[in-house]
């Protein structure tokens, strides 16, 4: 057993909630996420759909089925409810992502998930 602490999987990731609004039992959460070079979100899920666009940099988006895609500036993507995934910045400049979550009222924005055993991209 190692005495060293487990590294924070979100080290180098900052999230800013820009606005929230609840309509008909759905929390709409508008976010700005910045990943420093080399940073990763850690494996996680969302209880509702998250509609996002990469504003700058590039995001390597990995899914639990071990598929990945690189998403560049201006490109949209969707994280589906319950889908296990990770976001990584493998570049040399910050990656900035703007997102809109449509979540069940009162649900957490994200929940940590177990690493599905995919090789690092």
Image (cartoon, rainbow, N blue to C red):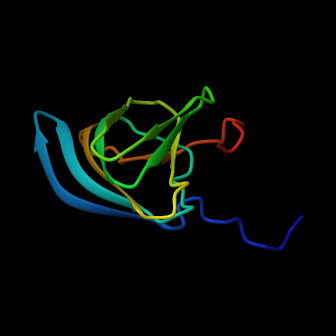
* Percent x, y of residue 16: 29, 63
Is 70 or 6 nearer to us in this picture? 70
Quadrant where the C terminus is found in the figure: top right
Residue appearing at x 45%, y 64% in the figure: 93
Is 44 or 119 nearer to us in this picture? 119
Is 14 or 71 nearer to us in this picture? 71
In this rendering, is residue 67 above or below 60? above
Is 47 or 51 nearer to us in this picture? 51
Residue appearing at x 34%, y 34% in the figure: 77
Residue appearing at x 26%, y 54% in the figure: 31
On screen, residue 4 versus residue 65, left or right, reads right
Tally of numbered discs: 0
In this rendering, is residue 49 above or below 40? above
Q: Residue furthest right?
A: 1
* Percent x, y of residue 109: 35, 48
Q: Quadrant of residue 90?
A: bottom right
Q: Residue furthest top?
A: 65
Residue appearing at x 45%, y 47% in the figure: 59
In this rendering, is residue 51 above or below 20? above
Quadrant where the N terminus is found in the figure: bottom right
* Percent x, y of residue 63: 55, 32
On screen, residue 68 versus residue 55, left or right, reads right
Q: Quadrant of residue 81?
A: top left
């Amino acid at each position: 057993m190692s005495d060293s602490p487990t590294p924070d999987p979100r080290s180098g990731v900052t999230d800013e909630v820009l606005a929230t609004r609840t309509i008909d039992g759905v929390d709409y959460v508008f976010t700005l996420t910045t990943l420093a070079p080399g940073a990763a979100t850690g494996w996680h899920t969302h209880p509702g759909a998250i509609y996002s666009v990469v504003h700058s940099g590039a995001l390597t988006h990995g899914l639990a089925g071990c598929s990945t895609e690189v998403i560049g500036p201006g490109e949209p993507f969707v994280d589906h409810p319950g889908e296990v995934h990770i976001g990584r910045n493998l570049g040399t400049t910050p990656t900035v992502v703007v997102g809109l979550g449509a979540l069940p009222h009162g649900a957490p924005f994200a929940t940590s998930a177990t690493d599905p055993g995919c090789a690092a991209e």
